[in-house]
Image (cartoon, rainbow, N blue to C red):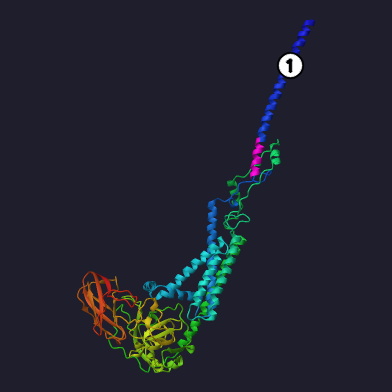
Amino acid sequence: MNRGAGLDEQGAEMDKDMHKRLDQDTAQATDEDTGKAMDKEITGQEQRAGTQVQQGQAGQPPRKQPQSKQGRPGQDRSKDRRTRDLWAAAAGLVAVGTAVVLGELTASLVSPTVSPVTAVGGAVIDAVPPGVKEWVISVFGTADKLALLGGMALVIAALAALSGVLEVRRRFAGVAVIAVFGAVGLVAVLSRADLTANAIPVPVLVALVGIALLRWLIRKLETWLPDPNGAPDGATDGEPAAATVPPEPDPSETRAAAQPVPVVAPAAETSPPETAAAARAAEPPAGEVGPARRRFLLALGGTAAVAAVAGVLASTLRGAAAVVSDVRSKLAIPTAASPAPPIPAGAEIRLDGLGPLVTPNKDFYRIDTALRVPLVDPAQWTLKVTGLVEREIELDFATLLAKPLTERHVTIACVSNEVGGDLIGNAKWLGWPVRELLAMAGPKPGADMVLSRSTDGWTAGTPLEALTDSRDALLVVGMNGEPLPLEHGFPVRMIVPGLYGYVSATKWVTELKVTRYADDVAYWTPRGWSERGPIKTSSRIDVPQDGRSVTAGTVVFGGVAWDQHTGIGTVELRVNRGDWKQAELAPGISKDTWYQWKLALPLTPGRYEVQVRATDLEGVPQVEESAPVAPSGATGFHTVRVDVKS
C-alpha cells in the first residue's frame, strides 16, 4: 500500500513537470510572436518617421501631394487660361480704342488739322515705297484712303488685344506696348508739316489714358479670374515657388520614433478624383454671375460706352469741316471775265455705258496724300510768291476773287492711272491765270521751276515755262459752276493742262516758290518719279467692258482719248491683232480736254480681243510698248476681250 502510494506520488510529479514544460514552451512562443509584432511596428514607425523627416515636418501627419488649383486637371487649367486671355484681349481693345477716340476728340478741340491717327496715316503714306503706293491705288482706286484707315484700324486692334493678353500674363508688358504705340504717334505728329504746338501733347495723352484704362480693367479681370496656374505665395504669375530643402532629422527624434508606440489606424484620405469632384461641386453654377464678374463686365461695357460717346462728340466737333462747308455753300463765285467756250455740237456721244463728257464733281477722282481733308477758312487763306523773284507777293482770297477770272474746260489725270484706268476727269474750272501772278512777282533769270506747296506741306515741282506760256494754267476757285469742293482743294488749287497732277495740280495751295530743279525737289521726285511729268497720249475702251458678253451682229465700241495741250487727231481699233480701223472721233471741247469716240463693228459668235490707239494732232501715235505707271506714266494699248453670243 505504501509502495502504491509512492508510485502515485511519482506519477503526479511527472505530470507536474510535463505541464511546466508546456507552459514554458507556450510562454516562449508568445514572447517570440510579441517580439515579431514589436519589430514590425518599429519598422513601420521608422518608415513613417523617415517620410515625415523628408517633408520637414517630423511628428506631424504626412502632407498630401500638391494638386492643381481646386483639384482641376491640366485640361481645365488650359481652358481657364484661354478664357482669361480672351477677356484680357477684350480689355486691351476697349482700353486702347477708348484712348484713341479720346485723342481724336481732344485733337478736334485743340488741333483740327493734325491728330495722332491722321499723323500716323500721313507718315505711312510718306514712307511707303512707290511700288506699294501704286499697288494700293490699282487695287482700291479712289478708296485708297479708306483702305489705309481700315488697315490702320486692324493693326491698332491687333496691338490693343496683344497688350491686354501680355498685361494679364506679366504685369507691365502690355503697358510697354501702349507706351511704344504712343511714342510712334508722337514721332508722327512731330513730322507733319502743318504741326501746331497744341498737337504735341495729344499722343502722350492717348498713351497715358490707354495705360491707365488697361491697368484698371486688368485688375478687375484678375479679381474675377485669378491665374489658373495657382501660383503659391511669394511666386509671380507664371513662376514656380522656390523649392524647400528638408531639414536634417534630429537623432533623438529618430530614436524616439523607433520606440514602440500604439498603433493607430490612419483616417481615410480623399483621393484626388474625389477632391476634384468636391471642388467642382463647391463652385457656383455656370450661369451664376458673381460680384467680381459683374464688376469687370460693367467696367468693360462702361468704358466702351464712353468710347462710343466720345466718338460721336469727335465726329461732331470734326464738324468744323461742316463750318467750312457752310462757308463754301454761301460763297458766291464771280462771273468769269473770260467764259469757257461753248461745248461743240456732237462733242458728247450718247452711248450706254459711256461716261459724260464733263465729269460731275461727286464722281471726280481724288488722289492725294491728305488722310483728312484740310480745313481752310477762306478768310484766313493767303498765297505767297517767294524765291527767285524781283518782289515777293502775298495774295488773300478776297483779292483773288476780285481779279479777272478765266473759265476753261481742262482734263486732268493722275500719273498713277493704269492703261485703261479711271483716274482721270474733265471739268470746267474757274480761276486766275498763274502767269499773271508770276508776272507781278518777276521771276529772276535762271529760275526754271515753281515749287507749289499745300497747306499740309505737300509740294509739286512745275516747269516755270508751263506756268508762263499761253496755256490756261489757273489758280482755281470754282469747279463746274460752283466753289471748289473741300476734297478738291477749297478754297484754291492749281490746274495746269498737259501735265500729270503730281507735278502741277496742288490742292489747298498756299505758296509758290520760284526756284531751280537743281536746288529744290518736290514731294514725289525723291520717291522715284520723274521731275517734269508731261501727259502721254492715251486712249480707253469704255463700251463694252472687258470680259462682257454681247450679242452677235453690229457691236458698238466707244470710249475716250486724250493728250492735253496737244489734242487728239485720230482714234483706231483693231480686232484680234488685225488691221486698224478708224473710229468716229467726236469734236473735242478743246485740245486741253479728252475726246469721245465710237466705232460699230460686225462680229459673229466667238471670242475677240479688241485694242485701241490714239494719234495726237501732231501725228505722233500712242506708244504701243507696255510700261508701268512709275516713273512717268503708263503706256500701252488698252485691250478688252469680249464674248460674242449668237
Q: Is residue 375 above or below residue 164?
A: below
- 506 relative to 174, above or below: below
Element carrying mark 1: helix
Residue 319, x across and y down, in percent: 50, 81
Image: magenta residue range:
43-54
Is residue 160 visible from the viewing direction of this image?
Answer: yes
Task: Name the amino acid type tagged 1.
Answer: Asp
Q: Is residue 289 visible?
A: no
The quarter of the rendered structure image containing the C terminus is bottom left
In the rendering, at what x and y percent does residue 413 appear? 35, 81
Query: Could you tell me how many numbered marks the image carries?
Result: 1
Q: Position of residue 142 (x, y in %)?
A: 39, 76
Occupied quadrant, residue 47 = top right
Residue carrying label 1: 17
- Residue at point 67% right, 35% down? 42
Q: In the rendered view, would you say 631 is above or below 390? A: above
Left or right of 594 in this view: 484: right
Q: What secondary structure predominates along the stretch shown in magenta?
A: helix
Classify the position of the N terminus by image quarter: top right
From the top left corner, tell me how far across and down residue 561 is, in percent: 29, 81
Query: In this rendering, would 216 be left or right of 490?
Result: right
Q: Residue furthest left?
A: 579
Crowding near the residue tagged with mark 1, few <14, some 14–19, many ≥20 C-alpha atoms within 10 Å: few
Residue 46 part of the magenta segment: yes
Q: Nearer the viewer, residue 150 or 518?
A: 518
344 magenta-colored: no
**Pick the front one: 515 or 552:** 515
